[in-house]
Image: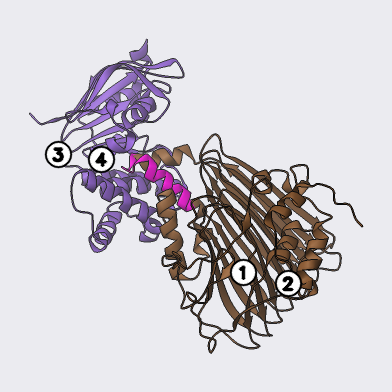
Amino acid sequence: MSVLTETKLNTFLSKLNLDINTNAQKEALQALENLDFPTTRDEYYKYTRLNKIANADLTVGHETHHYPAIKDVLVSKQFVVIENGVFRADVSSFALSEVAVNIETISEFSETTAKKDDLFQLLNIAGNHQTVFITIPEDTQWDEKVQVIFINTEKDIITNTHLVIETGKGAEGHVITNFISTADGPSFSNHFTEVQVAENAHIKLDKIQTGDGWYVATENVQQAANSSFKINTITLKGDIVRNNLNIEVGGENCETFLNGAVLTKNNQLVDNHTFVNHLVSNCMSDENYKYVLDGKSTGVFNGRVIVQQDAQKINAYQQNGNVLLSDFAKINSKPELEIYADDVKCSHGSTTGQLDDDALFYLQTRGISKQKARNILVSAFAGEVFDAIEDQKLADYVNGVLHKEFGWTN
Amino acid sequence: MSKTLLNVKNLHAEIEDKAILKGLNLIVNAGEVHAIMGPNGAGKSTLASVLSGRDGYEVTEGSIDFDGTNLLDLDPDERAKEGLFLAFQYPVEIPGVSNINFLRTALNEIREYRKEEPVSAKEFMSMVRERSEIVELDAKLASRSVNVGFSGGEKKRNEIFQMAMLEPKLSILDETDSGLDIDALRIVAAGVNKLKTSNNAVVLITHYQRLLDYIVPDFVHVLADGKIVKTGGKELALELEEKGYDWLTK
């Protein structure tokens, strides 16, 4: 008989009272016994305190019988709604004749790419009962985007939502994910996306975070040869947001694009940890994250790129630009490049500054108010990341949030 | 007598506790061109900065009346909306902000302030076409990021293009001639002359007489040690060219 030591995680889990049925859940829960919540002594959580989440009294979320407030965020005819972690078939709308979307239960842990040393991935598997599978068959191009809306409508709940995007060879598709909240207090969304990009497949993923509350979101992406993967991560709200984007490029001639925009105010904390692992030769990755931080908010960017020993002729670019709008906002930016091959082109850059006073004054002398001049300069700074949003309706939605929250549009 | 646009009385201003302007008086009426000349460090650029409302300059004494409004009460954008324009000695490069879009924003803010209708896209584009020709500014430059990748001459022409678009009552041209070759100088000067009417006025701040061959001033003022020490007609500029400033400042 094993003796359980009283860890924060144990206390947290016992309060949740998870409903454990499948082998996958059992295996995940067992692996969790060896772990605890990361602290700021852990290198990858140095600037990100999770105490608020760890100490919160949370329960497992349930769906309501109300129609959730998804109207503003809807941009596609093919959409899935997950409310408080539960699939809402009655308010979702997708035609199985056009898209292959299925809600299933993961039975074995080995069906996932979840890592046994990652608390949030394990917690997700242990707490998840419904996984959204989006499967784009071989040589199929989906013109209509598939949208998955994760909405939390109640406070003090945890949602372990799980999305799997699978592709056949030569498949092309675009998935839009939205994370929103109408709850009148914080809830904890612990989301997990797995993307498997097959040979010659081309996948685009938008991840739009515009909800209050606490978010940990992990993407495990695997790319096979001649594939491309493009992700836009846009974070405009959230009290604590931690994104873990892990991309493993396992086939040659791949292209990978990682775009990110973070806009914050008040006491927000937004942390993007990205990891591109180049296992093989002849690939390109291009990463660009921009942060605009106001109030007493904190931004964290950790961009890890590994070029493995046998991965020659890799072009890996990384850029992180930050603008601090207030004297109290903070950014912690860390590029982390590990290059073991000798014939590669890698670059990284990190810049942090304030808005250019001379440019502000120049615009003002032309009759533009100070606030509008600031907005023009912020928009000019972050615009290229927002320009990467290809879906016009989604861009309009994002512009609406930008206007409401920050007073400008792209 | 024509209307007084600018009335500067006994202006004292300092930057970081260092007095720069020490009792400057200046009256500019509609329809006039004034040149303010003077040695380096006399306070010429400080005058431009104080008039346009740049941060960091403290007015410790005196007043500035601009067409009936107390200029010192206004923010820089409000001064522009009241009809003041500053052509910068060093126009600022603003990556990512299109010259055209920002000008349209500016024009509409000014119109809104004056309770006028916003400019339509069509009307605006025809204004751009017509007024970029005044300074022979390539229409392609007009749509690029503000001053980014512009040559020195193009930046100065862009300043005058903006002046043409915004139709100010009073324009202050701060060392607009600096760094210009003779052809660019001629184009810029011709542009300023074309924009001159009996209702507006121009203050040229310059170090050299050269510009005044092309834009003929009604008054030439010598600014030295924070004050206007001599005022004359256009012939004063020639005298200064010949004798320098020493005879006035000793």
Of the two numbered discs 3 and 4 on the same chain, state the one appearing first in sequence: 4
Q: What is the spatial separation of the Cα atoms under label 2 and label 3, in whole angstroms?
A: 69 Å
Q: What is the spatial separation of the Cα atoms under label 2 and label 4, in whole angstroms?
A: 56 Å
Q: Are marks 2 and 3 on the same chain?
A: no
Q: Secondary structure at mark 3?
A: loop
Q: What is the spatial separation of the Cα atoms under label 2 and label 1, in whole angstroms?
A: 12 Å
Residue under the point 85% across and 51% down: A4
The residue carrying mark 3 is B199
Query: Looking at numbered disc 4 in the image, what kind of residue is underneath it?
Result: Lys
User: Which of the 4 quarters of the picture holds residue A223?
Assistant: bottom right
Whether A378 is among the magenta residues is: yes
Query: Looking at numbered disc 3 in the image, what kind of residue is underneath it?
Result: Asn
The residue carrying mark 4 is B81
Q: Are marks 1 and 4 on the same chain?
A: no
Quadrant the C terminus of chain A occupies: bottom left
Looking at the rendered structure, which numbered label has been put on residue A230?
1
Tell me where the magenta segment starts and ends, as one range. A365-380
* Chain letter, colour brown: A
Q: Nearer the viewer, mark 2 or mark 4?
A: 2
State yes or no: discs 1 and 4 in contact (Cβ < 8 Å): no
Name the tint of chain B in the rendering.
purple
